[in-house]
Amino acid sequence: MDRNFKKPMHEAPEFDERIIALDRVTRVVKGGRRFRFRATVVVGNNNGKVGIGVGKGGDVAGAISKASARAKKDMINFQLNKTTIPHEVQVASGGAVVLLKPASEGTGVIAGGAVRAVLEAAGVKDVLTKALGSSNKINNSYATVEALSQLRSTPVVQKESK
């Protein structure tokens, strides 16, 4: 065995994983309460690929790993326009409505909570957003992914009315 062989200290991860929500959920049974954990995770490659996953488990680590596996399985691709999105889009999912608008370079991600986590994991650097309707993190994250999946590669030009 060659002792001079060195393993890389730290390899860059393939995907950016962010935990959006981690909740303790309860089920009441005859003997009392059963506690489990529900994790909501967003996974992205910071270059136009993102997915959301929800997982439940008896412990936190199990719930997070299940959610992460689900997110990787359900990833979507979309086209970035430099550092922003190509056009404005508004999507409703459940009770949540999310509005995404392209922004000029240097603006940053103007978003809150779950919408910010999804957009940063997806690799969007400049965008204006507004979460309308529900404040539910899971529904807002699903609405954001749905909005990104509806993006077209070319900007949408609105016709002027006479």
Image: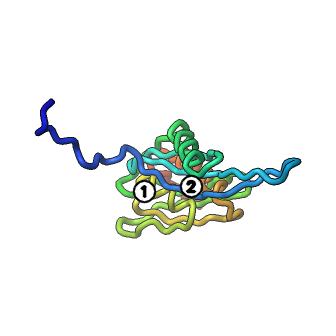
Residue at the spot of label 1 = 124
In depth, the one of 60 and 20 nearer the eye is 60
Residue 138 seen in render: yes
In the image, residue 162 above or below residue 73:
below
Q: Whole-percent x and y of residue 12?
A: 31, 48
Name the secondary structure under disc 1.
loop
Q: Whole-percent x and y of residue 95?
A: 73, 57
In depth, the one of 123 and 25 nearer the eye is 25
Q: Whole-percent x and y of residue 102?
A: 46, 61
Q: What residue type is labelled 1?
A: Val
In depth, the one of 14 and 7 nearer the eye is 7
In depth, the one of 114 and 9 nearer the eye is 9
Number of disc labels: 2
Residue at the spot of label 2 = 89
Q: Is residue 105 left or right of residue 111?
A: left
Residue at screen point 17% across, 41% down = 6
The quarter of the image holding the C terminus is: bottom right
The furthest residue to the right: 30
The mark that comes first in sequence, 1 or 2, is 2
Q: In this rendering, which labeled residue sits more in front, label 1 or label 2?
A: 1
The quarter of the picture where residue 96 lies is: bottom right
Q: Is residue 40 left or right of residue 18?
A: right
> How busy is the neighbourhood of tag 2: few (under 14 within 10 Å), some, or many (20 plus)?
some
Q: Separation of disc 1 and disc 2 at Cα?
A: 14 Å
In the image, residue 131 above or below residue 54:
below
The quarter of the image holding the N terminus is: top left
Q: In this view, does 77 lie to the left or right of 58?
A: left
Q: Whole-percent x and y of residue 140?
A: 63, 57
Q: Which amino acid does label 2 sit on?
A: Val
Name the secondary structure under disc 2.
strand
Residue 55: assigned label: none
